[in-house]
Image: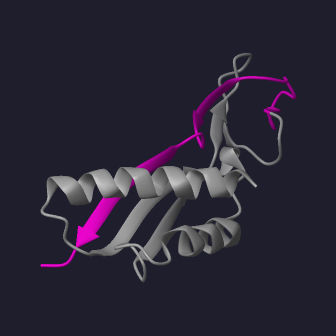
Amino acid sequence: MHELSIALALVEQVEAVRAAHGERPVVAVGVRIGSWRAVVRESLAFYYEAVTRGTPLEGSRLEVDTVQATAACRACGERFEVEGPFLICPRCGAVGGELLSGDELELVSVELED
């Protein structure tokens, strides 16, 4: 249920953007979320719609861009897509590594009415 807290944080950030730009209505909100974050898009959309109901953000589109988790093996240097909760090198089998992408959770755009 961490999607609810994410939705609430997004609304707070978007309200700050609105305040800085004349309180105009919001058309769309763009976010980038890494697959390593394990956010369920449908749940986030549900909670976003629920927490924006009755606010100036009501009816705005939530646009989610998912970033695939990738890692680099510390043992052999292989770069690979992460499948599942562990970093396991597909080439040498080493466990662990450096997460290169997939941990993102960021507001990337706010589209306001003209």
Considering every residue shown, the one lying at the far front of the view is 54
- Magenta range is 87-114
Q: What's the residue at 12%, 79% (across, down)?
A: 114
Which residue is at the front of the view, 41 or 2? 2
Q: Position of residue 41 (x, y in %)?
A: 65, 67
Q: Position of residue 39 (x, y in %)?
A: 68, 55
Q: Residue 111 location, x and y as percent?
A: 26, 70
Relative to 68, residue 71 above or below: above
Whether residue 44 is visible to the viewer of this picture, yes or no, is yes
Is 87 rendered above or below residue 106? above
- Residue drawn at point x = 67 percent, y = 30 percent: 78
Taking depth in this image into account, of 102 and 73 the one nearest to the observer is: 102
Does residue 58 appear to the left or right of 96 in the view shown? left
Residue 27: name its quadrant: bottom left
Rendered position, 53 above or below 108: below
**Hey, which quadrant is residue 80 in on the image?**
top right
| Residue drawn 53% across the image and 43% down it | 104
The colour scheme used here is one colour
In this picture, residue 2 sits left or right of residue 21: right
Q: Classify 9 as above or below 29.
A: above
Number of numbered markers: 0
Q: Check the picture and name the quadrant holding the N terminus.
A: bottom right
From this viewpoint, which residue is outermost toward the top?
75
Where, by quadrant of the figure, is residue 44 drawn?
A: bottom right
Q: Residue at x 50, y 49 (%)?
A: 9
Judged left or right of residue 93, residue 39 is: left
**Magenta span includes 97:** yes
Asked if residue 67 can be seen in this view, the reply is no
Question: Could you tell me residue 10's position as x and y percent?
Answer: 46, 55
